[in-house]
Amino acid sequence: MSDRQTLPNRRKPGTGRRKPGASSRSAARRQRKGGKWRRGWIIAVLALLVTLPLLFHRRIPNSFGNLGSLVDTFLPWVGVAIPVLAIAAIVRRSATAGVALLVPTLIWGMMFGNALVPGKGGGAYDVRVLSHNVDAANKDPQQTAADLLAADADIVALEEITAADLKVYKAAFADTYPHVVARGTVALWSKFPVEESESVDVGFAWTRALRAEVATPEGKVAVYVAHLASVRVGTSGFTSDQRNNTIKQLGQQIAQEKVAGVIVMGDFNGTANDRSLAPLTYGLRSAQGAAGFGFGFTWPAKFPMARIDHILVRGVTPTKAWVMDSTGSDHRPVVAELRI
């Protein structure tokens, strides 16, 4: 044997054995990366289901309990599911769910995003108009009248007025609005002269709509005030047949209107999305949609979930629109500024 000592084999740097557990940690990292796409499939499926009522709400028939109109009425609220599912996707760290959520987000944005665009409308206005269902069960019409006077509108349309409350509003508005038209449960007050007025038959035993020609300094406008039939949600579904009949009758009369400038105000018991409102809204422009910010929900007053009170126009330009605070009614008032 050699006298030399046998030295242990030296390994080059970097060629040593891997530390125990290094391989498993690397595999765990790869699993976590891949897991972002494997996790959250239930959330992704729910996100895609959210798109169904948005895309196909018009395919939902009204033959069973007017279900289609019910979905149309509350359709914007489908969007509430999107941030809820987004939070779930973040908690789960799911890339799959995040990508799936892009679909309902884009569709909802295309359908309703315009309502959230600031700065619509603008410019000078000629007439400020206000419409309010004051509620036949209103316990304090005097305070409601004071709230409405504070809005400083030029034309005020009120719906669901009882005979007793009409006296209250007439007394409260007397100094500000010298021109008054009252028909049944609807009425109009104006700072400008009313050249002529008439009741509008919408199929009720009592009057719930009127037409007036108002002579503004910038020209004459035809003003309609209407309170359409109520809808009911119950065991039989969304009952709206009577309302739909009133819509058709009022829509026919407005379509035949000869005055160029038309303002239609009132409680329509339906939203602009409700397909049944089409015979009335056709050819008219929503002041809120054209010059307001947000959806402008008006009912119920304590927590508004739908805009069933409207100001629609033709031949005039909305420059601003908004919803007032609650006045003691179960509806909130709507206001718009218009250029004649």
Image (spheres, rainbow, N blue to C red):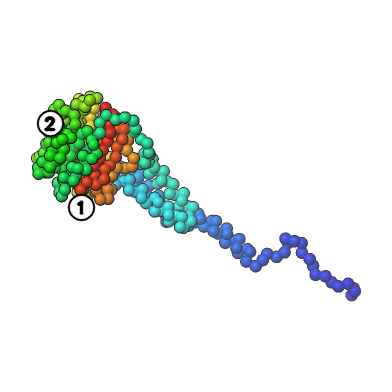
Measuring from the top left, give residue 32's x and y in whole percent.
54, 58
Q: Residue at x 23, y 36 (%)?
A: 152
Q: Return the mark for residue 198.
A: 2
- Residue 62 seen in this snapshot: no
User: Which element is circle 1 on?
Assistant: strand
Q: Residue at x 13, y 34 (%)?
A: 181
Q: Nearer the viewer, mark 2 or mark 1?
A: 2
Measuring from the top left, give residue 317's x and y in whole percent.
29, 30
- Residue 196 seen in this snapshot: yes
Residue 243 sits in quarter: top left
Q: Residue at x 9, y 40 (%)?
A: 205
Mark 1 is surrounded, within 10 Å at the Cα level, by few (under 14), some (14 to 19) or many (20 or more) other residues, namely few
Q: Return the mark for residue 234.
A: 1
Q: Is residue 244 left or right of residue 17?
A: left
Marks 2,1: beta carbons within 8 A: no
Residue 153 sits in quarter: top left
Residue at the extreme front of the image, as rendered: 175
Residue 333 sits in quarter: top left
Measuring from the top left, give residue 238's x and y in whole percent.
22, 48
The amino acid pointed to by label 1 is Gly
The amino acid pointed to by label 2 is Glu
Mark 2 is surrounded, within 10 Å at the Cα level, by few (under 14), some (14 to 19) or many (20 or more) other residues, namely some
Q: Is residue 243 left or right of residue 89?
A: left
Point out the tag, 2 or 1, that comes first from the N-terminus: 2
Relative to 37, say whether 254 is above or below.
above
> Considering depth in this image, is 155 or 152 the residue closer to the camera?
152
Measuring from the top left, give residue 27's x and y in whole percent.
59, 61
> Considering depth in this image, is 334 or 312 the residue closer to the camera?
334
